[in-house]
Image: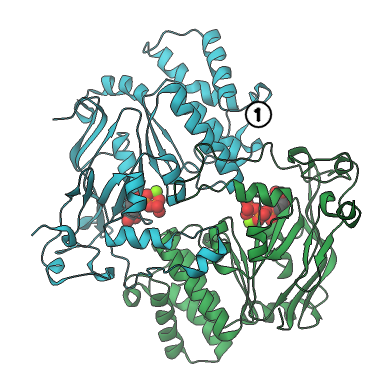
Chain colours: A cyan, B green
Amino acid sequence: MPDSQNLLDVRGLKVHFPIEKGIIFKRVAGWVRAVDGVDFSIKKGEALGLVGESGCGKSTTAMAVAQLQTATAGQVFLEGRDLASLSAKDLRAARKDFQLVFQDPYSSLDPRQKAQDIIAEPLRIFAKNGLITMDEAAIQRESLSLMDRCGLSASFATRYPHEFSGGQRQRIGIARALALGPKLIIADEPVSALDVSIQSQILNLLKDLQKDFDLTFLFIAHDLAVIEYFCTRIAVMYLGRIVEITDAATMARNPLHPYTKALLSAVPLPDPRKERSRRRIILKGDVPSPSIEYKGCPFRERCPQAMEKCALSPPSLMQAEEGHQVSCFLYGGA
Amino acid sequence: MSEESILRVEGLVTQFSTDRGLVKAVDGISFDLHRGETLGIVGESGSGKSVTNLSILRLVQSPPGNIAAGKVLFQGQDLLQASEEEVRLLRGKNISMIFQDPLTSLNPVLKVSMQIAEAIQLHHGLGRKPAKAKAVEMMKLIGIPDAERRADDYPHQFSGGMRQRIMIAMALSCNPDILIADEPTTALDVTIQAQILELIKSLSAKDKTAVILITHDLGVVAGMCDTVCVMYAGRIVERAPVDELFYDPKHPYTRGLLDSIPSVDLSGPDRLYSIPGAPPNLIDLPDACPFAPRCSRVMEVCTKATPPETVLDTATSRSVRCWLHTKENQNA
Ligand SMILES: Nc1ncnc2c1ncn2[C@@H]1O[C@H](COP(=O)(O)OP(=O)(O)OP(=O)(O)O)[C@@H](O)[C@H]1O
Ligand SMILES: Nc1ncnc2c1ncn2[C@@H]1O[C@H](COP(=O)(O)OP(=O)(O)OP(=O)(O)O)[C@@H](O)[C@H]1O
Ligand SMILES: [Mg+2]
Ligand SMILES: [Mg+2]
């Protein structure tokens, strides 16, 4: 049963997409196991970072947590409530508590709406459905104050998305996500499309907002430096599963899973001397396909430390040390 | 660099005419590229990195674009004066480019192995069969899973990251003299990125291919480049050998950029440094340093005149465009 300290508990989450074959008689020829048994929890006020290679299932996990993608199996508990068990009406009301911020601020903003209206939209919808009591004047005031809080001057209120830079558009997306006073922000690559100097502005803003609004984050990024800066805990995903999870400092100091080690060793460091002297673990072999059901450990073929038993059965996530879980036979298991 | 210069860009100016006015995307850029050298180009989004390189290959769409001035000397020949036909022959064979947006640069109705093989056939004079075999081999080299089976797939059947890698395979398969790579690994995760950068590096070492690498990732620059150009508002504001750029940046913008990077070792401060303000509008740039409104070390002169390029070291052609470093101010 979910722990009361946790804001979010994800249990055995699976999302499988059917691969359809045939033009007239459609049949399911296989499954893409995008998310294949994921468990994690996030404590109130914590930021959990999710990393892993392209296609490993990070966005699908985020969408399933946000109830925008139906799970094939498993549960998502927010403050102990199983979100999938809520009625459509209750789920709509519960959405106030969790909001998404996307990677591409351009395609996620309605191009025909002005900045202030984009930010005010969730308030208007909730007010209209009687889920909050706010009149239009209050909504106007609130959306302007959100713009101000996110570093957008009031003179921007009547501009359209295409008139903003990438960093400013991301600020609009963040202001909108904050409108309903959420507890959990699910941020899917919120700074990946921005260049370094804008990225640092947005990360600072998110940190400030986290303090001021007491926010909890599920934060997806492929840049480990960004994750380590922003997050208190880190989960590494590989082919639809979490292969290692621990606090940020431990992950940096003592990574255990061979994939995590390769990932960390591959992060380019902005320091030419360190770059020249370091040893990189360059992975060989094929990137695995999520449509194949692996008998053993799915990382086995690229793993520099693969053993015989890795081919026989998949390892499961186990405690390697206090607060540090890893799914690898090097650290025990059958 | 003791190697001979293979590409020299002189006073390149590229503009776009828009409803709001003339956008000076590239405003007087000069640099030399040597055989075997990897030159990094960094700078804020919109500073003209892509347009500079599209101009070199004469791929700027006109209208609205127009290369208004300058020379692009490849082995002594000015590409800006060459015929369409001559430039087309050079592209791919002598100078290959990996584009920032791989979706638009693959042919959607051609199997990917055929696209790679076509490039190989054209430039190596190989027959169909061996060209296709080499194409599959390239696909393996860049880490496409199941390369043999996937060779007959079409571009839309691959993920964004895979399409990016197919573009890279095409560009590398022709053994070009110069490889221009515009954000080649941005869509990829770090382990694949490491694999591909290693490939580019070995190519550059083995065949003395010169590389122009455009990237936002200063870590990639540190690991790959010999020399770095920093661009701001259509100009090169600093050029330096890679170590000097990282350990002794001269331009306040370069400094700001380096200070903005979050560090992986968790020893950094709780807040990241960030350069205040936003980049300038490239229409009607005043006669002043375009970075002045955001600069922490701004002086009166910075808002009154454009800083000239000051060469700090002729041997390495280290230079900076900043009033703090002009000859007069150095002596003062
Ligand atoms: N609607 C869908 N139908 C079929 N397959 C899908 C669908 N959405 C995602 N997938 C597949 O599921 C897998 C996981 O995709 P997902 O977008 O979650 O990856 P990701 O970790 O977010 O990757 P990236 O870093 O590239 O954003 C991929 O193999 C993808 O092709
Ligand atoms: N077709 C066009 N019409 C008008 N302006 C253009 C056009 N193409 C580019 N520009 C402008 O030229 C400037 C330089 O663009 P460029 O694509 O070279 O930037 P960049 O440095 O490559 O940026 P990024 O890092 O985002 O790729 C930008 O201000 C851009 O708006
Ligand atoms: Mg994703
Ligand atoms: Mg570009």
Instruction: Identify which residue is drawn at 44% across, 79% down.
Output: B138
In the image, is A197 to the left or to the right of A85? right
Residue B292 % position (x, y): 79, 41
- Quick check: is the Cβ at mark 1 less than 8 Å away from ligand 2? no
Q: Amino acid at mark 1?
A: Arg
Instruction: Identify which residue is drawn at 72% across, 56% down.
Output: B231
Check disc 1 and report its element: helix, strand or loop.
loop
Name the residue nearer the viewer: A289 or B107. A289
In the image, is A60 to the left or to the right of A203? left
Quadrant the N terminus of chain B occupies: bottom right
| Location of residue B325 with respect to B201 vertically, above or below | above
Residue B49 position by quadrant: bottom right
Q: Residues within 10 Å of mark 1 (few under 14, many from 20)?
A: some
Q: How many marks?
A: 1
Name the residue nearer the viewer: B85 or B222. B222
| Location of residue B236 with respect to A286 vertically, above or below | above
In the image, is A202 to the left or to the right of A74? right
Residue B27 position by quadrant: bottom right
Protein chain holding label 1:
A
Residue B282 visible in the displayed image = yes
Residue A82 % position (x, y): 20, 28
Residue A195 visible in the displayed image = no
| Location of residue A3 with respect to B11 vertically, above or below | above
| Location of residue B6 with respect to A224 vertically, above or below | below
Residue B53 position by quadrant: bottom right
* Residue underneath mark 1: A159
In the image, is B310 to the left or to the right of A40? right
